[in-house]
Image: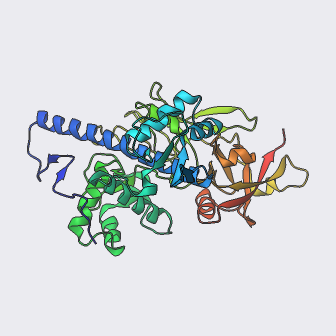
Amino acid sequence: MSDNSGYGNTALGVTFSTPFKSNQKDMDSIANTMQNKAEELERMAEVLITGEQLRLRLHEGKVIKDRRHHLRTYPNCFVAKELIDWLIEHKEATDRDMAIKIMQKLLDQSIIHHVCDEHKEFKDMKLFYRFRKDDGTFPLDSEAKVFMRGQRIYEKLMNVENSLIKTREEDSIPYERTLVASEFIDWLLQEGEMATREEAEQLGRRLLEHGIIQHVTNKHYFSDGDLLFQFRTNFRRRRRLMELLNERTRVIPESHDSPFCLRKQNMEGSTNSFLSVSPTKEIKVLSAVRRSSMSSSCGSSGYYSSSPTLSSSPPVLCNPKSVLKRQVSPEELQSPGGLFIKKTFTIIGDAVGWGFVVRGNKPCHIQAVDPSGPAAAAGMKVCQFVVSVNGLNVLNLDYRTVSNLILTGPRTVVMEVMEECQ
Protein backbone atom coordinates (compact mmCIF):
# COMPACT_ATOMS: atom_id res chain seq x y z
CA MET A 1 0.00 0.00 0.00
CA SER A 2 1.48 3.32 -1.00
CA ASP A 3 0.33 6.91 -1.20
CA ASN A 4 1.32 10.11 -2.92
CA SER A 5 2.88 11.78 0.08
CA GLY A 6 5.86 12.88 -1.93
CA TYR A 7 8.46 10.45 -0.67
CA GLY A 8 11.69 10.90 -2.57
CA ASN A 9 15.42 10.72 -2.19
CA THR A 10 15.67 14.11 -0.55
CA ALA A 11 15.41 15.20 3.04
CA LEU A 12 13.83 18.57 3.78
CA GLY A 13 14.69 19.79 0.31
CA VAL A 14 18.36 18.84 0.64
CA THR A 15 19.75 16.05 -1.54
CA PHE A 16 21.79 13.39 0.26
CA SER A 17 24.24 10.89 -1.15
CA THR A 18 25.90 7.91 0.54
CA PRO A 19 28.57 8.33 1.66
CA PHE A 20 28.02 12.05 2.27
CA LYS A 21 30.79 14.07 0.62
CA SER A 22 31.13 17.72 1.44
CA ASN A 23 33.23 20.09 3.46
CA GLN A 24 32.41 21.18 7.00
CA LYS A 25 30.81 24.43 5.88
CA ASP A 26 28.38 22.60 3.62
CA MET A 27 27.58 20.12 6.40
CA ASP A 28 26.87 22.93 8.86
CA SER A 29 24.67 24.67 6.31
CA ILE A 30 22.67 21.49 5.68
CA ALA A 31 22.38 20.84 9.42
CA ASN A 32 21.02 24.36 9.96
CA THR A 33 18.58 23.94 7.09
CA MET A 34 17.35 20.64 8.50
CA GLN A 35 17.02 22.03 12.01
CA ASN A 36 15.07 25.09 10.87
CA LYS A 37 12.76 22.99 8.72
CA ALA A 38 12.26 20.44 11.51
CA GLU A 39 11.30 23.24 13.92
CA GLU A 40 8.85 24.64 11.39
CA LEU A 41 7.25 21.23 10.89
CA GLU A 42 7.11 20.66 14.65
CA ARG A 43 5.23 23.93 15.12
CA MET A 44 2.80 22.93 12.38
CA ALA A 45 2.26 19.54 14.03
CA GLU A 46 1.55 21.14 17.41
CA VAL A 47 -1.06 23.44 15.84
CA LEU A 48 -2.74 20.49 14.12
CA ILE A 49 -2.80 18.38 17.30
CA THR A 50 -4.03 21.28 19.45
CA GLY A 51 -6.73 22.15 16.94
CA GLU A 52 -7.95 18.55 16.71
CA GLN A 53 -8.09 18.18 20.49
CA LEU A 54 -10.15 21.38 20.71
CA ARG A 55 -12.48 20.18 17.95
CA LEU A 56 -13.18 16.92 19.81
CA ARG A 57 -13.80 18.74 23.08
CA LEU A 58 -16.22 21.17 21.42
CA HIS A 59 -18.15 18.33 19.81
CA GLU A 60 -18.31 16.55 23.16
CA GLY A 61 -19.56 19.72 24.87
CA LYS A 62 -22.17 20.34 22.16
CA VAL A 63 -20.58 23.69 21.36
CA ILE A 64 -20.32 22.48 17.77
CA LYS A 65 -23.74 21.68 16.32
CA ASP A 66 -26.08 22.41 13.41
CA ARG A 67 -27.33 26.00 13.49
CA ARG A 68 -29.91 27.97 11.51
CA HIS A 69 -29.68 31.53 10.21
CA HIS A 70 -32.01 33.22 7.70
CA LEU A 71 -33.82 29.93 6.98
CA ARG A 72 -30.55 28.17 6.16
CA THR A 73 -28.95 25.39 8.20
CA TYR A 74 -25.18 25.44 8.76
CA PRO A 75 -24.03 22.00 9.97
CA ASN A 76 -21.27 21.40 12.52
CA CYS A 77 -20.44 25.01 13.36
CA PHE A 78 -19.93 27.17 16.44
CA VAL A 79 -20.70 30.77 17.34
CA ALA A 80 -17.54 32.84 17.82
CA LYS A 81 -18.89 34.80 20.78
CA GLU A 82 -20.06 31.64 22.56
CA LEU A 83 -16.73 29.92 21.94
CA ILE A 84 -14.83 32.80 23.51
CA ASP A 85 -17.05 32.47 26.58
CA TRP A 86 -16.28 28.72 26.61
CA LEU A 87 -12.51 29.24 26.36
CA ILE A 88 -12.52 31.64 29.30
CA GLU A 89 -14.82 29.42 31.37
CA HIS A 90 -12.52 26.41 30.77
CA LYS A 91 -9.41 28.47 31.58
CA GLU A 92 -8.01 28.10 28.06
CA ALA A 93 -7.77 31.90 27.83
CA THR A 94 -7.44 34.58 30.49
CA ASP A 95 -9.55 37.15 28.65
CA ARG A 96 -11.40 37.75 25.40
CA ASP A 97 -8.38 39.26 23.64
CA MET A 98 -6.32 36.13 24.29
CA ALA A 99 -9.17 33.91 23.14
CA ILE A 100 -9.41 35.86 19.87
CA LYS A 101 -5.64 35.52 19.31
CA ILE A 102 -5.81 31.76 19.90
CA MET A 103 -8.64 31.25 17.43
CA GLN A 104 -7.01 33.58 14.91
CA LYS A 105 -3.96 31.31 15.04
CA LEU A 106 -6.16 28.34 14.13
CA LEU A 107 -7.83 30.35 11.38
CA ASP A 108 -4.48 31.45 9.92
CA GLN A 109 -3.36 27.81 9.83
CA SER A 110 -6.55 26.75 7.99
CA ILE A 111 -7.80 24.70 10.94
CA ILE A 112 -11.05 26.71 11.11
CA HIS A 113 -12.82 29.14 8.77
CA HIS A 114 -15.93 31.30 8.55
CA VAL A 115 -18.80 29.17 7.21
CA CYS A 116 -19.18 31.42 4.16
CA ASP A 117 -15.50 32.43 4.02
CA GLU A 118 -16.53 36.07 4.33
CA HIS A 119 -14.31 36.88 7.30
CA LYS A 120 -10.54 36.33 7.39
CA GLU A 121 -10.39 37.48 11.00
CA PHE A 122 -11.84 35.78 14.03
CA LYS A 123 -14.31 38.25 15.53
CA ASP A 124 -15.98 38.38 18.92
CA MET A 125 -19.42 38.42 17.35
CA LYS A 126 -22.35 36.11 16.64
CA LEU A 127 -20.67 34.72 13.53
CA PHE A 128 -20.56 31.07 12.51
CA TYR A 129 -17.19 29.36 12.16
CA ARG A 130 -16.39 25.74 11.44
CA PHE A 131 -13.46 23.34 11.67
CA ARG A 132 -12.32 22.44 8.17
CA LYS A 133 -12.08 18.81 9.22
CA ASP A 134 -15.86 18.86 9.79
CA ASP A 135 -16.68 19.96 6.24
CA GLY A 136 -13.89 18.20 4.33
CA THR A 137 -12.04 21.37 3.29
CA PHE A 138 -8.88 20.77 5.32
CA PRO A 139 -5.92 21.15 2.92
CA LEU A 140 -4.18 17.77 2.71
CA ASP A 141 -0.76 18.75 1.40
CA SER A 142 2.20 16.36 1.55
CA GLU A 143 3.27 17.64 4.98
CA ALA A 144 -0.18 17.09 6.50
CA LYS A 145 -0.35 13.60 4.96
CA VAL A 146 2.93 12.59 6.61
CA PHE A 147 1.74 13.99 9.92
CA MET A 148 -1.59 12.14 9.75
CA ARG A 149 0.18 8.93 8.70
CA GLY A 150 2.53 9.28 11.68
CA GLN A 151 -0.38 9.83 14.05
CA ARG A 152 -2.17 6.73 12.77
CA ILE A 153 0.97 4.61 13.14
CA TYR A 154 1.56 5.99 16.63
CA GLU A 155 -1.97 5.11 17.76
CA LYS A 156 -1.78 1.61 16.26
CA LEU A 157 1.47 0.92 18.11
CA MET A 158 0.24 2.39 21.40
CA ASN A 159 -3.12 0.60 21.37
CA VAL A 160 -1.79 -2.96 21.12
CA GLU A 161 0.43 -5.07 23.30
CA ASN A 162 3.59 -5.84 21.35
CA SER A 163 7.28 -6.38 21.82
CA LEU A 164 8.17 -3.86 19.13
CA ILE A 165 8.49 -0.98 21.60
CA LYS A 166 10.61 -1.74 24.64
CA THR A 167 13.72 -0.77 26.60
CA ARG A 168 16.93 -1.50 24.71
CA GLU A 169 20.61 -0.56 24.94
CA GLU A 170 22.76 1.31 22.45
CA ASP A 171 26.43 1.80 23.28
CA SER A 172 25.71 0.28 26.72
CA ILE A 173 23.15 2.99 27.54
CA PRO A 174 19.52 1.89 28.12
CA TYR A 175 16.73 3.80 26.37
CA GLU A 176 13.04 3.36 27.10
CA ARG A 177 10.34 2.67 24.50
CA THR A 178 12.59 2.17 21.50
CA LEU A 179 12.02 0.80 18.02
CA VAL A 180 14.66 -1.07 16.04
CA ALA A 181 14.56 0.47 12.56
CA SER A 182 14.55 -2.86 10.70
CA GLU A 183 11.83 -4.30 12.97
CA PHE A 184 9.76 -1.15 12.50
CA ILE A 185 10.02 -1.61 8.74
CA ASP A 186 8.99 -5.27 9.12
CA TRP A 187 5.92 -4.12 11.08
CA LEU A 188 4.99 -1.47 8.48
CA LEU A 189 5.03 -4.14 5.78
CA GLN A 190 3.09 -6.61 7.93
CA GLU A 191 0.40 -4.01 8.67
CA GLY A 192 0.12 -3.04 5.02
CA GLU A 193 1.25 0.52 5.67
CA MET A 194 3.84 0.31 2.87
CA ALA A 195 4.42 -2.11 -0.01
CA THR A 196 8.23 -2.40 -0.08
CA ARG A 197 11.15 -2.02 2.32
CA GLU A 198 12.41 0.94 0.27
CA GLU A 199 9.09 2.77 0.66
CA ALA A 200 8.97 1.92 4.37
CA GLU A 201 12.50 3.28 4.84
CA GLN A 202 11.53 6.50 3.07
CA LEU A 203 8.48 6.78 5.34
CA GLY A 204 10.75 6.40 8.38
CA ARG A 205 12.91 9.22 7.08
CA ARG A 206 9.91 11.46 6.56
CA LEU A 207 8.67 10.74 10.08
CA LEU A 208 12.10 11.72 11.41
CA GLU A 209 12.21 14.91 9.32
CA HIS A 210 8.82 15.91 10.69
CA GLY A 211 9.93 15.43 14.30
CA ILE A 212 7.61 12.45 14.86
CA ILE A 213 10.46 10.02 15.54
CA GLN A 214 14.13 10.50 16.32
CA HIS A 215 17.28 8.46 16.86
CA VAL A 216 17.88 7.85 20.57
CA THR A 217 20.98 10.06 20.57
CA ASN A 218 19.88 12.07 17.54
CA LYS A 219 23.15 11.31 15.78
CA HIS A 220 21.82 9.15 12.95
CA TYR A 221 19.41 9.43 10.06
CA PHE A 222 16.75 6.73 9.63
CA SER A 223 17.90 3.66 7.72
CA ASP A 224 16.98 -0.03 7.49
CA GLY A 225 19.27 -1.42 10.18
CA ASP A 226 19.77 -2.03 13.89
CA LEU A 227 19.74 1.60 15.09
CA LEU A 228 17.27 2.56 17.81
CA PHE A 229 14.56 5.19 17.36
CA GLN A 230 11.81 6.61 19.57
CA PHE A 231 8.60 8.52 19.02
CA ARG A 232 9.37 12.13 19.76
CA THR A 233 5.79 13.40 19.35
CA ASN A 234 3.21 12.25 21.89
CA PHE A 235 -0.10 12.76 20.14
CA ARG A 236 -2.04 12.06 23.33
CA ARG A 237 -0.54 14.79 25.49
CA ARG A 238 -3.11 17.32 26.57
CA ARG A 239 -2.23 20.60 24.87
CA ARG A 240 -3.14 23.98 26.33
CA LEU A 241 -4.37 26.44 23.73
CA MET A 242 -2.18 29.14 25.26
CA GLU A 243 0.84 27.24 23.95
CA LEU A 244 -0.10 28.34 20.43
CA LEU A 245 0.72 31.95 21.29
CA ASN A 246 4.27 31.29 22.50
CA GLU A 247 6.48 30.36 19.59
CA ARG A 248 9.50 30.04 21.88
CA THR A 249 7.93 27.48 24.17
CA ARG A 250 9.23 24.05 23.26
CA VAL A 251 6.97 21.22 24.32
CA ILE A 252 8.70 18.17 25.74
CA PRO A 253 7.31 14.81 24.59
CA GLU A 254 5.28 13.19 27.33
CA SER A 255 5.51 9.72 28.71
CA HIS A 256 3.87 7.32 26.30
CA ASP A 257 3.15 4.85 29.11
CA SER A 258 0.80 7.22 30.89
CA PRO A 259 0.00 10.08 28.51
CA PHE A 260 -2.36 11.99 30.76
CA CYS A 261 -0.26 14.86 32.14
CA LEU A 262 0.42 18.39 31.00
CA ARG A 263 4.10 19.32 31.13
CA LYS A 264 5.95 22.27 29.61
CA GLN A 265 9.57 23.31 29.44
CA ASN A 266 10.74 26.63 30.82
CA MET A 267 13.20 27.89 28.22
CA GLU A 268 14.50 30.68 30.47
CA GLY A 269 15.74 28.29 33.12
CA SER A 270 17.80 25.16 33.14
CA THR A 271 15.29 22.59 34.32
CA ASN A 272 12.30 20.73 32.98
CA SER A 273 9.07 21.16 34.88
CA PHE A 274 5.49 20.00 34.86
CA LEU A 275 2.41 21.15 36.73
CA SER A 276 0.79 19.00 39.37
CA VAL A 277 -1.75 19.34 42.15
CA SER A 278 -0.35 18.76 45.62
CA PRO A 279 -2.25 17.22 48.55
CA THR A 280 -2.82 20.77 49.86
CA LYS A 281 -4.45 21.77 46.55
CA GLU A 282 -1.72 24.27 45.82
CA ILE A 283 -0.25 24.19 42.34
CA LYS A 284 3.41 23.33 42.41
CA VAL A 285 6.11 23.06 39.80
CA LEU A 286 8.08 19.86 40.15
CA SER A 287 11.51 20.24 38.60
CA ALA A 288 13.48 17.40 37.11
CA VAL A 289 17.09 16.72 38.02
CA ARG A 290 19.95 17.67 35.70
CA ARG A 291 22.04 14.78 34.38
CA SER A 292 25.02 14.38 32.10
CA SER A 293 27.68 16.83 31.01
CA MET A 294 25.87 17.34 27.70
CA SER A 295 23.05 19.40 29.25
CA SER A 296 20.76 16.41 29.28
CA SER A 297 17.79 16.50 31.59
CA CYS A 298 15.39 14.09 33.19
CA GLY A 299 11.82 13.70 32.07
CA SER A 300 9.18 11.06 31.90
CA SER A 301 9.52 10.36 28.22
CA GLY A 302 12.75 8.38 28.21
CA TYR A 303 14.14 10.40 25.32
CA TYR A 304 17.80 11.22 24.96
CA SER A 305 19.46 13.37 22.33
CA SER A 306 22.79 15.15 22.18
CA SER A 307 23.14 16.48 18.63
CA PRO A 308 21.56 19.77 17.49
CA THR A 309 21.57 18.77 13.83
CA LEU A 310 18.16 17.10 13.65
CA SER A 311 16.44 18.37 16.74
CA SER A 312 16.56 21.13 19.30
CA SER A 313 14.49 19.27 21.87
CA PRO A 314 16.31 18.66 25.16
CA PRO A 315 18.00 15.32 25.86
CA VAL A 316 16.12 13.11 28.29
CA LEU A 317 17.30 9.83 29.76
CA CYS A 318 15.25 8.89 32.79
CA ASN A 319 11.97 9.32 34.67
CA PRO A 320 11.52 12.43 36.85
CA LYS A 321 12.19 12.17 40.57
CA SER A 322 9.33 10.61 42.49
CA VAL A 323 7.05 12.98 44.40
CA LEU A 324 6.90 10.48 47.27
CA LYS A 325 8.76 11.22 50.49
CA ARG A 326 8.97 7.49 51.14
CA GLN A 327 7.78 4.27 49.54
CA VAL A 328 5.16 2.21 51.39
CA SER A 329 4.14 -1.43 51.05
CA PRO A 330 0.65 -2.77 50.23
CA GLU A 331 0.57 -4.25 53.73
CA GLU A 332 1.16 -0.85 55.35
CA LEU A 333 -1.56 0.73 53.22
CA GLN A 334 -4.11 -1.88 54.30
CA SER A 335 -3.10 -2.06 57.94
CA PRO A 336 -6.16 -1.53 60.22
CA GLY A 337 -5.92 1.74 62.10
CA GLY A 338 -3.01 2.82 59.95
CA LEU A 339 -1.98 6.21 58.65
CA PHE A 340 -3.93 6.00 55.39
CA ILE A 341 -7.56 6.58 54.43
CA LYS A 342 -9.33 5.28 51.33
CA LYS A 343 -10.99 7.51 48.76
CA THR A 344 -12.94 6.64 45.61
CA PHE A 345 -13.00 8.78 42.47
CA THR A 346 -15.14 8.49 39.36
CA ILE A 347 -13.24 10.16 36.54
CA ILE A 348 -14.86 10.72 33.15
CA GLY A 349 -12.18 11.13 30.49
CA ASP A 350 -12.53 13.94 28.00
CA ALA A 351 -11.37 14.05 24.39
CA VAL A 352 -7.69 14.03 25.35
CA GLY A 353 -7.53 11.80 28.41
CA TRP A 354 -8.06 11.75 32.16
CA GLY A 355 -5.40 14.21 33.27
CA PHE A 356 -3.01 12.33 35.58
CA VAL A 357 0.21 10.33 35.58
CA VAL A 358 0.75 7.03 37.37
CA ARG A 359 4.22 5.99 38.47
CA GLY A 360 5.85 3.55 40.84
CA ASN A 361 5.52 -0.13 41.55
CA LYS A 362 3.64 -2.27 44.09
CA PRO A 363 1.85 0.01 44.82
CA CYS A 364 1.69 2.70 42.13
CA HIS A 365 1.20 6.32 43.08
CA ILE A 366 -0.13 9.47 41.45
CA GLN A 367 2.94 11.32 40.19
CA ALA A 368 1.24 14.33 38.60
CA VAL A 369 -2.22 15.78 37.98
CA ASP A 370 -3.20 18.23 35.27
CA PRO A 371 -4.87 21.11 37.17
CA SER A 372 -7.39 21.63 34.35
CA GLY A 373 -8.12 17.94 33.72
CA PRO A 374 -10.95 15.59 34.76
CA ALA A 375 -8.88 13.91 37.51
CA ALA A 376 -8.23 17.20 39.33
CA ALA A 377 -11.92 18.06 39.08
CA ALA A 378 -12.76 14.72 40.72
CA GLY A 379 -10.38 15.46 43.62
CA MET A 380 -7.31 13.43 42.71
CA LYS A 381 -3.97 14.65 44.11
CA VAL A 382 -0.34 13.67 43.85
CA CYS A 383 1.14 11.18 46.34
CA GLN A 384 -2.05 9.13 46.52
CA PHE A 385 -1.54 5.35 46.15
CA VAL A 386 -3.65 3.43 43.62
CA VAL A 387 -5.59 0.55 45.17
CA SER A 388 -8.01 -0.47 42.42
CA VAL A 389 -9.08 0.42 38.89
CA ASN A 390 -12.67 -0.35 37.91
CA GLY A 391 -12.92 -2.89 40.73
CA LEU A 392 -9.64 -4.68 39.98
CA ASN A 393 -7.07 -4.66 42.80
CA VAL A 394 -3.79 -3.24 41.46
CA LEU A 395 -1.73 -2.95 44.64
CA ASN A 396 0.79 -5.50 43.33
CA LEU A 397 1.04 -4.20 39.77
CA ASP A 398 3.53 -1.77 38.20
CA TYR A 399 2.59 1.58 36.67
CA ARG A 400 2.83 0.33 33.07
CA THR A 401 0.22 -2.34 33.71
CA VAL A 402 -2.04 0.06 35.60
CA SER A 403 -1.73 2.69 32.86
CA ASN A 404 -2.62 0.08 30.25
CA LEU A 405 -5.71 -0.96 32.23
CA ILE A 406 -6.92 2.62 32.17
CA LEU A 407 -6.05 3.23 28.52
CA THR A 408 -7.78 0.08 27.29
CA GLY A 409 -10.78 0.36 29.60
CA PRO A 410 -13.97 2.44 29.47
CA ARG A 411 -14.01 6.20 29.30
CA THR A 412 -15.34 6.38 32.87
CA VAL A 413 -12.73 5.15 35.35
CA VAL A 414 -13.54 4.31 38.96
CA MET A 415 -10.39 4.42 41.07
CA GLU A 416 -9.80 3.68 44.73
CA VAL A 417 -6.76 5.37 46.25
CA MET A 418 -5.15 5.59 49.68
CA GLU A 419 -4.13 8.97 51.03
CA GLU A 420 -2.03 9.68 54.10
CA CYS A 421 -3.98 11.25 56.96
CA GLN A 422 -3.07 14.87 57.52
Q: Which sits in the foreground, 373 or 273?
A: 373
Q: Which residue is outermost to the front?
A: 71
Q: Position of residue 180 (x, y in %)?
A: 34, 62
Q: Which sits in the foreground, 110 or 197?
A: 110
Q: Position of residue 273 (x, y in %)?
A: 54, 35
Determine the residue positioned at 47% across, 69% down. 162
Relative placement, left or right, of 395 versus 421 is left
Q: Which sits in the foreground, 292 or 40?
A: 40
Q: Position of residue 151 (x, y in %)?
A: 41, 57
Quadrant of the rendering where the N terminus is positioned: bottom left
Relative placement, left or right, of 375 versus 265 is right
Determine the residue positioned at 23% across, 71% down. 196
Determine the residue positioned at 65% across, 44% down. 369
Q: Is residue 139 above or below residue 291?
A: below
Q: Which residue is outermost to the right?
A: 337
Residue 207 location, quadrant: bottom left
Q: Is residue 161 above or below residue 245?
A: below
Name the image colouring: rainbow
Quadrant of the rendering where the C terminus is positioned: top right
Q: Position of residue 62 (x, y in %)?
A: 62, 53
Determine the residue positioned at 54% across, 47% down. 78
Residue 42 location, quadrant: top left
Q: Which sits in the foreground, 147 or 356?
A: 147
Residue 128: tell me if it is visible.
yes
Residue 380: tell me if it is visible.
no
Relative placement, left or right, of 399 versus 28 is right
> How many numbered marks have been drawn onto this rendered protein structure?
0
